[in-house]
Image (cartoon, grey):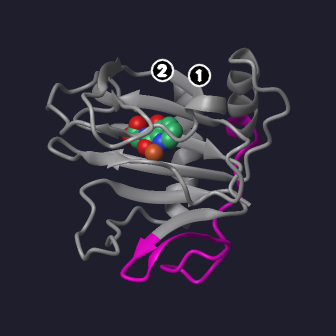
Amino acid sequence: MAGALLTELAAVEAAAPLRNMVTPGGFTMSVALTNCGALGWTSDRRGYRYTGIDPLTGQAWPPMPQALARLAREAAQAAGFDGFAPDACLVNHYLPGARLSLHQDKDERSYDFPIVSVSLGMSATFLFGGLARAGRPLRVPLHHGDVVAWGGVDRLRYHGVLPLADAPHPVLGSRRINLTFRRAG
Ligand code: MD6
Ligand code: FE
């Protein structure tokens, strides 16, 4: 299963290379990103947004492989979210030390759809917080092959990823890949 995903991802990354985006505040993200699907999430000094065109290549984002869209739909269904049809898949690559600070996913047009997240490679500690930034988030370990679906009343919870420890994974080595599927448009 993971092997098929990695083959699909290699093709996506060949068409839309991984890059370290700059936040509106001027920081370069430690996580390297790319996208597939009709829409892709990007960040630069002007803000966060979804675009149909990859600003790096000037081309449309590569299409979302059907196997990925299907995995996301089935995972959402299993969590009680019927009819999830993602139009955006954000691909996050972490090297040791990379982290994602606490944030809400708020750039999507509607919050009525869930988000499905797939983790591959090295394990990470996911921070699952409340609806306000304050408070001590729950720490949830995410391992290779874990799939998380969340939505509904939890859709706007703050969340993040602690700096990645270097404990190489047998297949992916010193890397973590996270895919997040969304209905963005
Ligand atoms: C990550 N995930 O696991 C980052 N956002 O590397 C996210 O930021 C995320 O996993 C919204 C919903 C699920 C997620
Ligand atoms: Fe997020």
Of helix, strand and loop, which one carries label 1?
loop
Main SS of the magenta part reads: loop
Q: Are marks 1 and 2 in contact (CB under 8 Å)?
A: yes
Whether residue 162 appears in magenta in the rendering, the answer is: no
Against 60, is 9 above or below?
A: above
* The C terminus lies in quadrant: bottom right
Give how far across and how far down residue 162 sits, in percent.
22, 36
Quadrant in which residue 128 is drawn? top left
Looking at the picture, how far across and down is residue 106, in whole percent?
54, 55
Residue 30 at x, y = what percent? 24, 56
Which residue is found at the position 76% from the left and 32% from the top?
70
Q: Residue at x 24, y 28 (%)?
A: 136
Residue at 57 percent of width and 60 percent of height: 107
Residue type, label 2: Gly
- Of the pair 109 and 76, the residue shown nearer to us: 109
Find numbered disc 2 in the image and state the secondary structure of the residue it sits on. loop
For the N terminus, give its image quadrant: top right
Q: Is residue 178 visible?
A: no
Residue located beneath label 2 in the image: 145
Tell me if I can see residue 175 in this picture: yes
Q: Residues within 10 Å of mark 2 (few under 14, many from 20)?
A: some
Where residue 157 appears, as percent x and y from the top left, is 47, 37
The residues bearing labels 1 and 2 have C-alpha atoms spaced at a distance of 9 Å
Say whether disc 1 or disc 2 marks the residue closer to the N-terminus: 1
Which amino acid does the dot numbered 1 rest on?
Answer: Met
Number of numbered discs: 2
Task: Kindly indicate the quadrant of the structure image that contains residue 54.
Answer: bottom right
Q: Which residue is mark 1?
A: 1
Rendering quarter of residue 121: top left
* Residue 64 painted magenta: yes
Q: Nearer the viewer, residue 145 or 87?
A: 87
**Residue range highlighted in magenta:** 43-68
